Each structure stands twice: as structure tokens, then as C-alpha cells.
Amino acid sequence: MLEYTLNELERLVDHTNLHAYASDADMVKLCDEAKEYHFRMVAINQVQSKVCYNELKDTDIDIGAAISFPLGQTTIESKLFDIKNALENGANEIDYVINITEVKNGNFAYIKDEMERIVKLCHDNSVLIKVIFENTYLTKDEIKHVAEIAKEVKPDFIKTSTGFGPSGAKIEDVKLMKEVVGDDVSVKAAGGIRNSDDFLAMIAAGADRIGTSSGIKIIDAIKQRMEFDHVDSIKIDRKYQKNMK
């Protein structure tokens, strides 16, 4: 059983706006909200890295650039170039989508090579790296196989979804991913998490980050619940307790 203060729950949120039509004004708003709620990161498309960096450079809120998003169907070289560009423009977290086609081809050597090269680039630059599986397109065996690769390669996080597929994060997928990687890698749940019950359930299942565009609504609901119960923290019963990032 773990206890989370409101601020600790806020720091699990990757505050997200990945819409194709998001303007610079939308990015400023996203960053202002992240500062107000002390979220851990803003999750954005790569091209908006500099705008968000300028808004957040004097804070402890990270700028998370999405790479090869949302399909993952670019070459390793393209992903590496885009990551370098994002870092040059101020990003200090990276979420990239794996090459799902190569998973379907059974070419797990490619998936490992892709992950190793991207993780090395990010860690050489002291940047946190998350690997997006997009589980909606994968079988349970494929999820397990990619998670086993991650356990060996050791990115900082593996992530359930982009939020742009037919379905998003599922409790059973979070549990499966965490069961495979254990304490070696953290898990991020993202996609379709829009209320406090789902948010807390994902944490209980083993997630240490939650990607959502509903973070304000979720945190406000949790705050109201805590005030009603006259408590300073929320207890969450979870099997995996060491990965508090």
C-alpha cells in the first residue's frame, strides 16, 4: 500500500496536447496549466518543442516531444534525426512509437536495434526516454515480447498507447507490461484516461506516469475527494512499489 499526496499525484501527470491543429497559443495555455498544477511534463508534438521550452525553461516541468507519432512508421535514422532536432529545441523527454510493422513481421531484432539506438542517444544526452507500444494493434504475446526487449535494453518507460488508435490504455495491459519489466523499467499509461477512478486504477495496476489531456479535471476531482474525506493523502494498493519516478 502506497500513500500519495496531491502533489505526488500531480507529478505523475504528463499534461497532453497532441492535436494536429494545436496553435502556439494552445501550447502557452498547456504550459501555464502545467505550471499551475505542477504536472511532471507537457506532452507535445516535436515541432512545438521550442515554444514550450521558452515557457518552461525556468521550471521543473519537462518538455516531452513525441517522435514518429502516432504511427511509428519511419526509419530508425529518421527517428534519431527527429530526436536530435527535438533536443536541440529544448525537449528533455522523448516518447517514440515503435515500428509496429516490424513487430507484425516478427522482426524483433529490428525492434531491439531501434530501441537500443534511441535509448543510447537519449541517455547519452541525459534525456528520459519512453517507448510507445500502441497495444491496440498488438497481441498479448507481442506486447510481452517487446516488453522483454525493453527489460533488457532499459528505456526509462514503456508506454501503452498514443491515444490516437482505436483504443487506449487498458488495466490488463499495464499489469502485463509491469509483470514483464518489474522494477527495471517504469510503465506509462496513456489514451482514454479521463476520470479520477481510471487514473487511480492505472496507478494501482503499476503505472508510474499517466498521459492525459484531462489532468486538470482528474486532479480537481481527487482534490475534492480528499477535502471531503479530510485527508492529506490517498492510499493506493499496488503490487509494484519501487518505481517512484
Image (cartoon, rainbow, N blue to C red):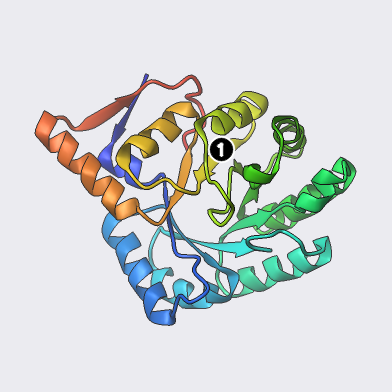
The residue lying at 63 percent from left, 60 percent from top is 70
31 to the left or right of 162: left
Measured as percent of width and height from the top left, residue 128 is found at 59, 52
Q: Quadrant of residue 118?
A: bottom right
Is disc 1 placed on a helix, strand or loop? Answer: strand
The residue lying at 81 percent from left, 45 percent from top is 103
Q: Quadrant of residue 143?
A: top right
Measured as percent of width and height from the top left, residue 80 is found at 76, 64
User: In which quadrant will I find the N terminus?
Assistant: top left
In this view of the protein, can residue 156 be seen by the observer? no
Amino acid residing under circle 1 = Val
Measured as percent of width and height from the top left, residue 245 is found at 48, 40
66 to the left or right of 139: left
In this view of the protein, can residue 210 be seen by the observer? yes
114 to the left or right of 224: right
Badge 1: few (under 14), some or many (20 or more) residues near its Cα, within 10 Å? many
Residue ID for mark 1: 187
- Residues 22 and 27: in front is 22
The residue lying at 67 percent from left, 73 percent from top is 85
Vertical side of 82 occupied by 129: above or below: above
- Residues 88 and 177: in front is 177
Q: Residue furthest bottom?
A: 24
Vertical side of 19 occupied by 171: above or below: above
Measured as percent of width and height from the top left, residue 64 is found at 53, 61
The residue lying at 72 percent from left, 38 percent from top is 150
- Residues 83 and 140: in front is 140
- Residues 123 and 28: in front is 28
